[in-house]
Image (cartoon, rainbow, N blue to C red):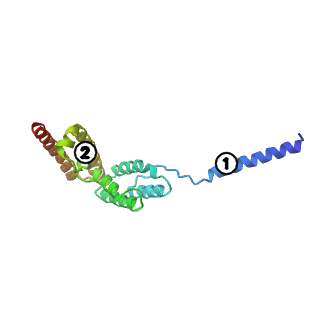
Amino acid sequence: MSNFKLKSRLAFASILAVSMLLTACASNEPSCMSPQTRNLSNAISAVQSNLQSGCQAYFDSYYDDLLTIAEGDPRPENKREFSEFLVWAADDGLLSKRQAEDYYNRYFNVKFMSMRGDYNNCSHTCPNKQKVLYNMERELSDKERGLLRVSLDNDGYYRADQLFQEVELVLEATCTACAAGR
């Protein structure tokens, strides 16, 4: 093979490799990185941008990141910022309205999402009492994070804790009565 043909093929291969590299670098794949700021408002803006750029699969991770950032600067206004973020997510079609409410209530409301339902306690809740209580304990931990560590709502958290204890007692009495009635 002549020296000229060899150089031509090498040049062509080099140009092809560089163009493939440039094409790969120019792709619009989202980075889906966690927010790199400690300011909640700025972090929410960054997350919204990522979610609109194709990173919807990371919603749960982003939500956890935002909670962590808010824990670094706890204040009552954080509840409102999370509420507005979740309303935006629902309006943008990332979550249903029900899902957005569930996210908010799990962390920032005293009522327990784990006890929501239209089931008969004797036939549904009592046979699953340990699982229900376990889920409520996990949710109480999330409420501690949201109400206490993110938004400084001590009263709200203590109401949720009291509600948990009351539900535990009522559920025990109800299941005892259900068992006696069989």
Residue in view at x 88 percent, y 42 percent: 3
Question: x, y (%) of residue 135?
Answer: 26, 42
Q: Mark 2 packing: few (<14 Cα in 10 Å), some, or many (20+)?
A: many
Instruction: State how far apart marks 1 and 2 are (Cα).
Output: 50 Å
Between residue 150 and residue 171, name the one nearer to us: 171
Q: Which quarter of the figure is the C terminus placed in?
A: top left
**Residue 31 shown left or right of residue 27 in the figure:** left
Residue furthest out toward the bottom: 91
Quadrant in the rendering for residue 171 = top left
Q: Is residue 36 above or below residue 181?
A: below
Q: Mark 1 packing: few (<14 Cα in 10 Å), some, or many (20+)?
A: few
| Residue holding disc 2 | 140
Residue in view at x 16 percent, y 45 percent: 167
- In this view of the protein, can residue 36 be seen by the observer? no
Instruction: Identify the amino acid type marked 1.
Output: Leu
Instruction: Identify the amino acid type marked 2.
Output: Leu
Between residue 126 and residue 163, name the one nearer to us: 126
**Residue 166 shown left or right of residue 64 in the figure:** left
| Residue holding disc 1 | 21
Residue in view at x 19 percent, y 40 percent: 126
Secondary element at tag 1: helix
- In this view of the protein, can residue 44 be seen by the observer? yes
Question: x, y (%) of residue 47?
Answer: 44, 55
**Residue 132 shown left or right of residue 87 in the figure:** left
